[in-house]
Structure formats: C-alpha cells, structure tokens
Image (cartoon, rainbow, N blue to C red):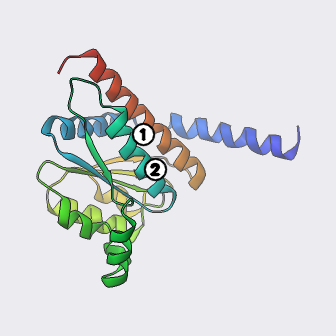
Amino acid sequence: MTDFEDFTQDYFDALQAAARRLDPKALAATLDVLRGVAARGATLWIAGNGGSAALADHTACEIGKGTHVEPHPPIRAVSLAANGPMLTAIANDVAYDQVFRRQLEIHLREGDALLCISTSGRSPNVLEACRYARKREAPTVAFVGYDGGELARLADHVVHVPVDNCGISEDVLQSVMHVLTQYLERERRARPA
C-alpha cells in the first residue's frame, strides 16, 4: 500500500474505534431531550463555530425536515450560527463571545433546549450560551471531543468523542446526529400522533 492508502485506512480505523467508544447512555439521554422538545412543542437551539457551525446548521435541517412525519407536528430546531447579520451585529457591537447568548436572550422560551457543539469544549461563545441556558433552566446537551473541556462539565448531558483529532470528532458527531434524527423519524413513523 502507498502512504496515502495507509493514512486512509488508519483514519477510518480510528473513526470506527472512536464511534465504538461512545456512551450509549449519553446518546439515549440526548434522544430524551429531543423527545421532550417535540412533546412540548418547544425549540432546540444549536450553537457551534466553524465545522461545528456547519453541523449545527445540518442538525437543524435534519431535525426540522427529516423528522417531520405526518400527522406529528414538526420539531423546531434552529442553528444560532445561521443568521449572519445577527452574528456580525452582536460580534461588532457587543463581543464575539456573546453571539449565541444574546440570541438566546431574545429567543429562548420555557421548554426549549440547547445543543452546544464544540470539539474542544472550550469555545467561549458556546460556553456563554450554555451558561445562559442553564441559568434559564433549559436542558443542555454538549457534543464534544478531545478531553471535553469546560463544556463537558457544564452541560446536563454530554456526548463525548474522546479522541485528539478534530476531524474524527466531527465525523463521529455528524454520525451521532444522523443516528438521533433517523431514529426519531423511525419512531414517529411507527406510532400515530
């Protein structure tokens, strides 16, 4: 094999090993948070930067569209990274570490929940959002990698990919999102509203 083929095989081996290390109880707790949001007719707010912002957007799409099975009402999910004008206004006029918290101050309602995505677990703006949601007694879930950072200690429920590779963490967390949303869709199809 070539060096690239070895690298590729090693990457996918590490990806599979990381996925196998996930805590099934953490996944089940996250599913329960999503079920609760749906049952309350509430909103799941999602925060993340960079690749985690892309996952926040994708998660909002999959929850909103992918789990919408008639006659069940759709589940509202909104990425706090999606509103560019709002993000830049808060970053410019207040501070970048407030870009998600300030949006939650505007939008968070009783019954809502927050999903925080940060592979490092140390993103200041994600931590601020999590602190605010906890202060408001909203359920919080963290998707983290590496050692989990402060976010793993702050959130109510933690899905932790314990590897020191951002790409592998993001790939596993993307798969976690698909597992959760596809299971919710399946569950909704199996039972009438």
Image quadrant occupied by the C terminus? top left
Could you tell me residue 152's position as x and y percent? Answer: 36, 56
Give the camera-side residue of 125 and 189: 189
Q: Amino acid at mark 1?
A: Met
Could you tell me residue 76's position as x and y percent? Answer: 25, 43
Give the camera-side residue of 5 and 10: 5
182 to the left or right of 9: left
Instruction: Choose top left, top right, bottom left or bottom right for residue 59.
Output: top left
Residue at the spot 37% in from the left edge and 78% down from the top edge? 91
Image quadrant occupied by the N terminus? top right
Q: Which residue is mark 2?
A: 55
Q: Amino acid at mark 2?
A: Leu
Give the camera-side residue of 175 and 107: 107
Evaluate whether residue 68 shows in this view: yes
Residue at the spot 19% in from the left edge and 38% down from the top edge? 36
Q: Which residue is mark 1?
A: 177
Instruction: Choose top left, top right, bottom left or bottom right for residue 124.
Output: bottom left
137 to the left or right of 50: left
Q: Are marks 2 and 1 in contact (CB under 8 Å)?
A: yes
Residue at the spot 44% in from the left edge and 38% down from the top edge? 176
63 to the left or right of 176: left
